[in-house]
Image (spheres, grey):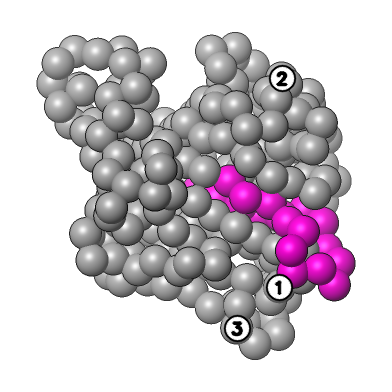
Amino acid sequence: MRRRRLLTAGLTAAVTAGLGTAGITRAAAAALDPTLPPGGNFDLAIWQLQLPTGSPGNPDTVSPARLKGASGYTNPAYFWTDKNDGSMTFWAPEKGVTTPNSNYARSELREMNRDGSAADWTLSGDHTLSAQLRVVSVTKNVAVGQVKLGTGGTSTKPLLELYYRADGDIHLGTEDSPAGGQTLHRVGNVALGVKWTYTLNVSGNTAALTVNGVRTTYTIPSSFNPYRQYFKAGSYNQSSSESTTNGAKVKFYSLTVQHG
C-alpha cells in the first residue's frame, strides 16, 4: 500500500472523486484560500522552511510544527500567501544568508517526516514530488525542485535539480557522481509568469521528470546507491550580488509528495 502525503487542500476530495493527475491539480489550486497562511492551504507538516536570513553560514529555519495549520508561520518578505490567488509564494534575493556549501540564498522547503525528523529515504521504492507553479520574477536562474543527497556519504550535492531560467527555458541538472559534475538537460520552455507543472520521480536507479505532460527518463549512477535522499521545493536563487531587490519569486499552486 502506498503512503500518500497529500499536501494541498482539496486533494483528498479530488482523489475520492476519481480525478486524474490533472484533475487533482486543478481541484487543489481551486481550493486555495487567499486569507490563510501557507499552512492553511498546504499540508506543511512534512516540510521545514529555510530562509535567506540569519547569521553567516547559518540561515534561519522554521519547523513543520510552526509552519502547519491555519495559524501557521508567514513572512511578508520571503514566504507568504498571495492575497489574489492563494498561492504559496517564495522570494529569494540575490543578497541573503546562505548555507556553508552554497553561494546562493534561498526561501525553500526541505522534506521532513511527520514525526519531525529529517526525511532520508533510499533509492529503492518509488518517490515522487509533484507541483503546479509559476515563476513571476528571476534574475538569471532559479531552482524550483530538488532531490538532495542525505546520509550515506560525505557529498552534499543535489542528485537532481530543476532550474527555470530568465528566458523561460527549463533544465534538469543530473549529478554525474557524488564527487560532483552536473549534466544539464533542456526539458521545455514556459514564459515568465505562466503556470506549469512538474513531477520528479525516483524509482531505484531511474529518475523520471515530467514537465507539462512530457516525460523524460535518466539513469542514476550506481555510485549514488549508498546515499539516501530527500526532496526540496521553493525558490533557490542561482545568482548572487549585493542587491536585495533582484532575485527570484516563485508561486506554488499545488505540491505533493508520494512514497511507495
Question: Which one is in front, 247 or 56?
Answer: 247
Label 1 amino acid? Answer: Gly
Q: Please name the residue that numbered disc 1 is placed on.
A: 96
Q: Residues within 10 Å of mark 3 (few under 14, many from 20)?
A: some
Q: Is residue 218 left or right of residue 229?
A: right
The x, y position of residue 28, in whole percent, is: 30, 31
Which span is picked out in magenta? 224-250
User: Label 1, label 2: how many angstroms apart (C-alpha)?
Assistant: 29 Å
Question: Which one is in front, 242 or 68?
Answer: 242
User: Label 3, label 1: how many angstroms apart (C-alpha)?
Assistant: 9 Å
Closest to the camera, between mark 1 and mark 2, is 1
Q: Residues within 10 Å of mark 1 (few under 14, many from 20)?
A: many
What is the residue that sits farthest to the bottom in this orientation? 55
116 inside magenta stretch: no
Find residue 191 and report its image quarter: top right
The x, y position of residue 90, in whole percent, is: 54, 54
Q: Please name the residue that numbered disc 2 is placed on.
A: 188
Q: Is residue 81 above or below residue 16?
A: below
Label 3 amino acid? Answer: Gly
- The earlier-in-sequence mark between 1 and 2 is 1
The x, y position of residue 145, in whole percent, is: 58, 43
- The earlier-in-sequence mark between 3 and 1 is 3
Question: Which one is in front, 196 or 213?
Answer: 196
Residue plotted at (31% across, 71% down):
66
Q: Please name the residue that numbered disc 3 is placed on.
A: 54
| Label 3 close to label 1 by CB (< 8 Å) | no
User: Label 3, label 2: how many angstroms apart (C-alpha)?
Assistant: 35 Å
245 inside magenta stretch: yes
Residue plotted at (64% across, 16% down):
216
Label 2 amino acid? Answer: Gly
Find residue 224 and report its image quarter: top right
